Image (cartoon, grey):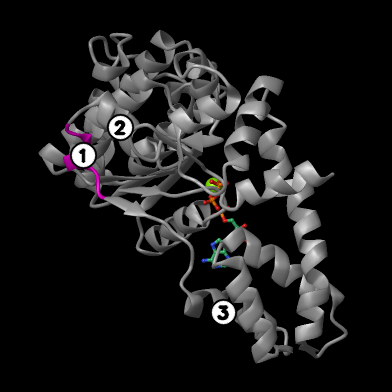
Amino acid sequence: MMLLGLRGIGKTVLLNEIGRIAENEGLLVSRIEAPERQNLPTLLYPEMQKVLRSLSTVEAAKQLSKRGLKALRGFGSIFKIEFAGVEVGVEPEPGLADSGDLQHDLPDLFGVIGRAAKAADRGWVLLIDEVQYLTRPDLSALIIAIHRISQDGLPILLVGAGLPQVARLAGEAKSYAERLFYYSEVGPLDPESAALAVQKPIEREDASISASALDSIVDRTKGYPFFLQEWASAAWDLAEGPEISNDDAARSYNATIASLDSGFFKVRIDRLTKAEVAFVRVAAGLGDGPYPMAEIASAMGRSQSSLGPIRANVISKGMMYSSEHGFLDFTVPLFADFMRRQKLV
Ligand SMILES: Nc1ncnc2c1ncn2[C@@H]1O[C@H](COP(=O)(O)OP(=O)(O)OP(=O)(O)O)[C@@H](O)[C@H]1O
Ligand SMILES: [Mg+2]
């Protein structure tokens, strides 16, 4: 399963919740986040080691997990993984997961882990956040491994989360990815859920919020979780209590925007070069997205092809995504508003 959505929409929260549910069901759960410059073998190695060690304590899975640990040993050497916990007394098994080609070795390893898990009557849930930062070869290898697992009916489940472009990236890496994954779009909360997200934590503290204050927060945040969180927190801090009034909500609005501007929004722009900022600023100046690439180019007085590298960078840095052919949009909700506010300063 792949959870796809914009920044601050609740993907990580959802992934953690899925992990909690899986743990309560007695499944083995691993959680990794794909950073921009770290490879998949290095990220997965310690998790696979933990899972195999845990499975090796189950009598019925002992042999298979030992074999898995041997394979992992060879895998660790060939991918030059510097790990603290070298398996003492474990000799690598030549020919298993040690070809140096991740597209062969990862499916091999997942196969052994899956068979060991099946023998132990357990399951392994692998949660990967920020999937869009995986390199194409890493993503391909992961897809092949999951494909193999699903064909062999082994108990390994991948739940990924990332920006909307993940669907396209996965499809480009392996065309069958479209049929392999269940893509679930994570969008803003509906008004009822948004109201609950604000109200429930307040009531847990034996306080309350007036209906009109709640309405205005739900309405103006458009159900975006990061915005709800920030505003509700600012209103809570400002209110005398025990009820958060409409006036408290109204008075905390500016503090909320200021806090988002200097945090949530600003960290995105800080990662861009000057030329990329100019590109993003021109797009925001056109109104709310999605933006036709042709229009951005003409507003900048440039040709579309000359903007190719900048376009590629704002996408790979996760600032924008290609919403449909020839169109771009921000990955951060309400980002165009933020850029336009910056102009006034
Ligand atoms: N279901 C929810 N109920 C209450 N608050 C939520 C919920 N989902 C998200 N939030 C709030 O929104 C914030 C952003 O959520 P989260 O970090 O999961 O977003 P994300 O989609 O992973 O964003 P990013 O792409 O930037 O990583 C959380 O820190 C939390 O405050
Ligand atoms: Mg996240």
SS for dot 1? helix
Residue occupied by mark 2: 170
Residue 195 disc label: 3
Q: Residue at x 17, y 33 (%)?
A: 176
Q: Amino acid at mark 1?
A: Glu
First along the sequence among labels 3 and 2: 2
Real-space Cα distance between discs 1 and 2?
8 Å
Q: Position of residue 304 (x, y in %)?
A: 46, 19
Q: Nearer the viewer, residue 277 or 165?
A: 277
Residue range highlighted in magenta:
176-182
First along the sequence among labels 1 and 3: 1
Real-space Cα distance between discs 3 and 2?
35 Å
Residue 178 disc label: 1
Real-space Cα distance between discs 1 and 3?
35 Å
Q: Amino acid at mark 2?
A: Ala
SS for dot 2? helix
First along the sequence among labels 1 and 2: 2
Q: Quadrant of residue 74?
A: top left
For label 2, count other residues whose C-alpha is less than 10 Å away and answer few (under 14), some (14-19) or many (20+).
many
Q: Amino acid at mark 3?
A: Ala
Q: Position of residue 268 (x, y in %)?
A: 66, 37
The reply to whether dot 1 and dot 2 touch (C-beta < 8 Å) is: yes
SS for dot 3? helix
Q: Position of residue 89 (x, y in %)?
A: 42, 18
Q: Quadrant of residue 115?
A: top left
